[in-house]
Image (cartoon, rainbow, N blue to C red):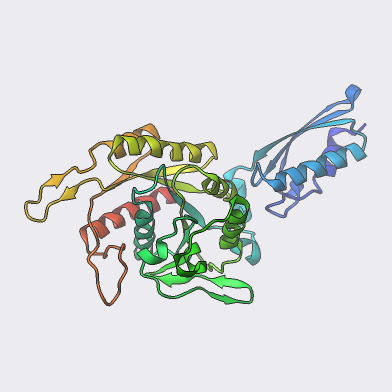
Amino acid sequence: MMNEQQVRELLGQLEDPFLHRTLEQTGGIINVSIKEEKQFVSVKIAIAKTNTPEQMTLQMKIVELLKENGAASVGIRFEELAPEVLDSFRGQATEAEAQDILSPLSKVQFIAIASGKGGVGKSTVSVNMAVALSRLGKKVGLIDADIYGFSVPDMMGIQEMPVVKNDRIYPVERMGVKVISMGFFVENNAPIVWRGPMLGKVLDQFFRDVEWGDLDYLLLDLPPGTGDVALDLHQMLPASKEIVVTTPHPTAAFVAARAGAMALQTNHEILGVVENMAWFQSKLTGEREYVFGRGGGPKLAEELRTDLLGQVPLGQPDWEDEDFAPSVYAENHPTGKLYLEMAQKVIDQLAK
């Protein structure tokens, strides 16, 4: 029967499936326990990302290797490597590893924009937050992940199409934001009738086959609710922060809490809440009318134990014929300034 040192030497040769370093190099063998009378070996292994198909493959390799070397039965527990360990490997990442944005070694920070229901202005918040981050000097990408209800190209006034070179898709850049959307690949606004597995492949392409280049942040305009696409995205990403959008109405906030709960259950941190359509301000009197009620945003932020990033009033941007983007507020517009303030809060939180 093997001893602890032999087990560590054997397993130390196996690679972390995401870091492509051996478990010896990553310090991934946390604990080894052996019961000789039962020929039972129990190990605790830390890897870059858990609950994935890659983890299952590694698990099978560990069981096979230990049984080949005398273990009658094997017990395995997995946990994720500490953030500071991952940070140390990011500095050693090859160019290919750094450019794979789904790799734990990527420096790109994901920000998912979610809502519990449709019609609360989640996509409007997504495009304006992306543009605001770009205006503050950040390198920003935006994935329109609302496959059935794609709207980002239209909202940003995008006329061009992505270019494909050498099997790589180059996103369209608009207002300093690199954009990819299902809307680029559907003719004449045709409805999408695909099923879940096919949609998963499209989303995977948006991450792996798009030439994003050097990014600070990649924003994802999620589908409303907590369906398959949103769940797939949460499981696909190495880590993401989430902004939850609601209206002031208590029912909208109640439903939005489900989207926040999904983020927490899949170990994604909530950055804050944006209350959209918070009020309508009359240009004549300057008075605020609370068309959709009051209190939904602060209540949701309190329930999710996060910050209220901002309250956005009802209104539309000032349209320009020269640079038409029907849903993007100008930098000097009062609501444009509000998005800049919210974007700065996001930058400050992510820098902590």
**256 left or right of 73?**
left
Nearest the camera: 172 or 229?
Answer: 229
Instruction: Tell me the quarter of the image containing the N terminus.
Output: top right
Total tally of numbered discs in the picture: 0
User: Can you give x and y, in whole percent of width and height, for residue 321 in the image?
Assistant: 26, 75
Image point (55%, 40%), residue name: 266
Residue 237 picture location, percent across and down? 57, 50
Q: Is residue 102 visible?
A: no
Farthest-out residue, top: 37
Residue nearer the viewer, 136 or 173? 173
| Front position in the image: 247 or 265 | 247
Q: Position of residue 127 (x, y in %)?
A: 37, 60
Find residue 189 and report its image quarter.
Answer: bottom left
Which residue is drawn at the image coordinates 84% and 43% (left, top)?
9
- Looking at the picture, tell me which residue is in the foreground, 136 or 272: 272
Percent from the top left, x then y, of residue 170? 53, 72
Q: Is residue 161 left or right of residue 295?
A: right
